[in-house]
Image: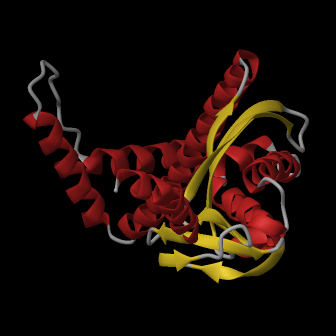
Amino acid sequence: MLPGLAYYIPAIILAFAILAAAVKILREYERGVVFTLGRFTGVKGPGLILLIPFVQQMVRTDLRTRVLDVPTQDVISHDNVSVKVNAVIYFRIVEPDKAIIQVADFMNATSQLAQTTLRSVLGKHELDEMLAERDRLNADIQEILDKHTDAWGIKVANVEIKHIDLDETMIRAIARQAEAERERRAKVINAQGEQQAAAKLLEAADILGQRPEAMQLRYLGTLNFIAGERNSTIVFPFPIEFGDILKASGAKRGD
């Protein structure tokens, strides 16, 4: 009995090996690129996949979003400022057959393309644009990358510039520029305020000059304001009529 069973053991082991090579299980986020005798015959998955052993081979691909950290790049801006920039890219495979057949290593190819694109795009802009318009630069880089990686079956979902590093000399220069800009705005606002105040004072003078009683009321209001303050100032009211008398006497002496 035992010698007969030992005779079938190699056949049983061979059957299990063939079954293991034929049956594949792919997860929901996986796809299998199948080659039959070296030729591409389709994309399968997810779930249970049956292959012909030794005739068909399968390459697994992951469809989940991948994160690619672009190494720090030395960039010279359009206004000849040297900066160090790094970024992060989010992409995923949308056509597994192209990602396997069209490019040998899609991760390395995407990384190299991202580095060159980052230097090329940022080199066309000035430093102020890099610091203030990151969203627009991110969109430009994403559009270029997505256009070039489409032939590889890759979709670039997002690009984010993480850091723009400047040397200390440039940081101090930018700080001085910002301070000068704030001073300029303060002077302009102050001048505009003086202009508006002068216009209002001229308008008020025209209104008060039309009626002498208005000037008298303004004079009494000013005295009331001064008297209300807690100070040691003593105010002696000077009637406005005395001013008219002095003007009249001066005019007579002049005659």
Q: Would residue 131 appear left or right of 64 to someone viewing this image?
A: right
Q: Residue at x 68, y 64 (%)?
A: 139
Outermost residue on the bottom side: it is 42
The picture places residue 91, in percent across and down from the top left corner, at 62, 61
| Image vertical order of residue 199 relative to residue 189, above or below | below
The picture places residue 152, in percent across and down from the top left corner, at 79, 69
Q: Quadrant of residue 206?
A: bottom left
| Image vertical order of residue 157 relative to residue 248, above or below | below
Near-viewer residue (99 or 186):
99
Q: Quadrant of residue 242?
A: top left
Q: Would residue 62 appear left or right of 123 to someone viewing this image?
A: left
Give the position of the N terminus as an image quadrant: bottom left
| Image vertical order of residue 21 relative to residue 254, above or below | below
- Whether residue 220 is visible to the viewer of this picture, yes or no, is yes
The picture places residue 252, in percent across and down from the top left corner, at 50, 48
Q: Residue at x 45, y 68 (%)?
A: 27
Q: Residue at x 25, y 55 (%)?
A: 218
Q: Would residue 131 appear left or right of 31 to someone viewing this image?
A: right
- Whether residue 149 is visible to the viewer of this picture, yes or no, is no
Near-viewer residue (111 or 82):
111
Which colouring convention does the figure follow? Answer: secondary structure
Q: How many marks?
A: 0
Q: Residue at x 28, y 49 (%)?
A: 240
The picture places residue 163, in percent across and down from the top left corner, at 62, 37
Q: Quadrant of residue 34?
A: bottom right
